[in-house]
Amino acid sequence: MRKPERARGRLASFLTTLTVLLLVAFAARAEEPVTELNRAESVERPWARDVTPERQKAAERLFLDGNRLLKDSLFVQAVDKYRAALSNWDHPGIHYNLALALLNLDQPLAIHEHLQASLRYGAAPLDGEKFDHAKKYLALVMQQLAKVEVVCDEPGATVALNGKTILRSPGRYESLARPGEHTVTAERPGFVTTRQTKTLLPGKPTTFQVKLYKPEELIEYRRPWPMWGPVMLTGAGALILATGAVLTVNARDRFRDFDEQVATRQSCAAGCVPDSELERSKNQGETFQTLAVVSYAVGGAAVAGGIVL
């Protein structure tokens, strides 16, 4: 992990811990939890619609057991009782007390879920104070969580967040998550798997814009011709350079023969005009020398071009 990401991770951890402490401290100052479920019998109760009296009584028994456990600080057992009560009656008061129990278990996502459920029908199923407390709790929890958005427009792709499938694209996914590192992966047959990891900060939105690519689309550089082309060009250049070296040796030999013949002739001691034999040696040397220079130029250019290509 890079240093800025580590720093953001430490900041997220610190802010989360601070918010948890604020939540627990606020809960400690709050009044007692909801103590009865049928306090609003005189008004219309949409939260009790289609719930039989038998199920209401069963839920209330479990609810009161949860309250006793909550008072004794047996939070895990209280959570179990409240969840069992909710299976009989989806009552805002049960959601509220369940959120209070979860405040002590560091489960901000679950707290957020149940606080929202407790506010669903307004203050009637709770009371004015409990309703206000629930809104304050919810505001604090929102500061503890990060908003995450995942967008993928590739048809037929499967998108997962931390290994859990969240989307069959094209589409968009929005949710809350705990701060820290989160990884989004996207897969589709015939495409390279895409993986993105980002550090989510509390109270901040983070967007994953997911794109998928075929293997050939990920080639950063494509050669304009096969590899054998530059290799053959380089080899040909080296061969031409070697030919130039042979021509240089031949030119040197011809000039040496010319010099030796001139030196051994008495008629040339004070200077002479070369005859046809001497002229032939001189011309051959100059021809070899010219061809050698051309070979060096062409071979050097070919080798350099092959290396560049």
Image (cartoon, rainbow, N blue to C red):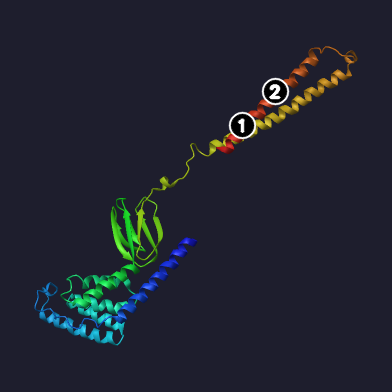
For the C terminus, which image quadrant?
A: top right
User: Can residue 86 be seen in the rendering of this structure?
Assistant: no
Relative to 22, does residue 177 appear above or below in the rendering?
above
User: Can residue 295 be seen in the rendering of this structure?
Assistant: yes
Mark 1, Cα crowd under 10 Å, few <14 / some 14-19 / many 20+, is some
Q: Nearer the viewer, residue 5 or 300?
A: 5
Residue drawn where x is 37% and y is 59% of the image = 184
Whichever of callouts 2 and 1 sits on the residue coming sooner in the sequence is 2
Q: Is residue 193 left or right of residue 47?
A: right
| Dot 1 amino acid type | Ala
Residue drawn where x is 41% and y is 45% of the image = 217
Relative to 197, does residue 259 appear above or below in the rendering?
above
Element at label 1: helix
Relative to 289, does residue 84 appear above or below in the rendering?
below
Element at label 2: helix
Q: Is residue 285 left or right of residue 4?
A: right
Residue drawn where x is 78% and y is 25% of the image = 253
The residue carrying mark 2 is 290
Measuring from the top left, give residue 286's x and y in whole percent. 73, 21
Measuring from the top left, give residue 150's x and y in whole percent. 32, 57
Q: Is residue 129 left or right of residue 179?
A: left
For the residues marked 2 and 1, what is the alpha-carbon distance in whole angstroms? Answer: 17 Å
**Residue 268 occupies quadrant:** top right
Measuring from the top left, give residue 244's x and y in whole percent. 69, 29
The residue carrying mark 1 is 301
| Dot 2 amino acid type | Thr
Q: Nearer the viewer, residue 261 or 199?
A: 199
